[in-house]
Image (spheres, grey):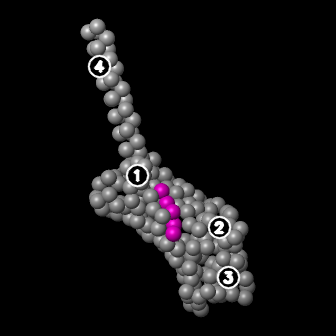
Amino acid sequence: MIRIAHFKKTAMKKITCIFFAVAMSFMTQAQNKYFTRSGKVTFSASTPLETIEAENDKGTSVIDAATGQVEFSVLMKAFLFEKALMQEHFHENYVESDKFPKSTFKGTIANMKEIDLGQNGTYKAQIKGELTLHGITHPLETVAVLTVSHGKLVAVTEFQVALAEYGIEIPSIVREKISKVVAVKLDASYAVLSN
């Protein structure tokens, strides 16, 4: 009888330990991921003849601190211009938003071992991956500045996109007014992803 009671007690301790380990694993996984639905993407295709700028504050992104994986996605129709006509041309003639509704980036932080997102500070992240725009995918490398403060993460980066590489054609009539290389800036505030 004492042996059975001891066996039950030992089994309960093991089950409790396993349950605790699984719960901690889930908690750690949740804490290792950072998420935003309000990443801000701005771009400029300006030339001396014309100012062409747009902004999109609905970027969705996840950063997995455990693996260094990064994903970022923007709906093309969420880009807003000061001039309605520019916005119309952008969506209908250039990026064809109905046909290609999203632009995505999938990649990794190559130097993740040097970065501790659990520790307050500023880090330079080497980002490598692939950008998909207008249905075409190309490699993209950039450096992002990651700032960690009390569980919040802010990521800022800038890079350039050559329109021709992504099959975006500029009509000859406006060729001098639109830059062939677009300057893109990304500024996103992340929170810890919780289950």
Q: Is residue 146 visible?
A: no
Q: Nearer the viewer, residue 67 or 17?
A: 17
- The answer to whether 175 appears left or right of 186 in the picture is right
Q: Is residue 18 left or right of residue 131?
A: left
Q: Which residue is mark 2?
A: 101
Q: Amino acid at mark 3?
A: His
Residue at image mark 4: 9
Is the N terminus in the top left, top right, bottom left or bottom right quadrant? top left
Real-space CA distance between mark 1 and mark 2, rounded to the nearest whole angstrom: 28 Å
N-terminal of the pair, mark 4 or mark 3, is 4
Nearer to the camera, 125 or 82: 82
Q: Earlier in the sequence, mark 3 or mark 1?
A: 3
Q: Local crowd at mark 2 within 10 Å, few (<14), some, or many (≥20)?
A: some
Q: Is residue 8 visible?
A: yes
Vertical arrangement, residue 160 with respect to residue 83, above or below: above
Magenta: main secondary structure equals: strand
Tag 4 or tag 1, which sits nearer the N-term?
4
- The x, y position of residue 80, in whole percent, is 56, 79
Dividing the picture into quadrants, the one containing residue 45 is bottom right
**Which residue position is annotated with label 1?**
194
Give the mark toward the camera: 2 or 4: 4
- Spatial separation of the CA atoms under disc 2 and disc 4: 58 Å
Q: Which mark is residue 89?
A: 3
Question: Does residue 107 appear to the left or right of 151 in the view shown?
Answer: right
Q: CA distance from mark 3 to mark 1?
A: 40 Å
Closer to the camera in the image, 61 or 44: 61
Q: Position of residue 28 (x, y in %)?
A: 37, 44
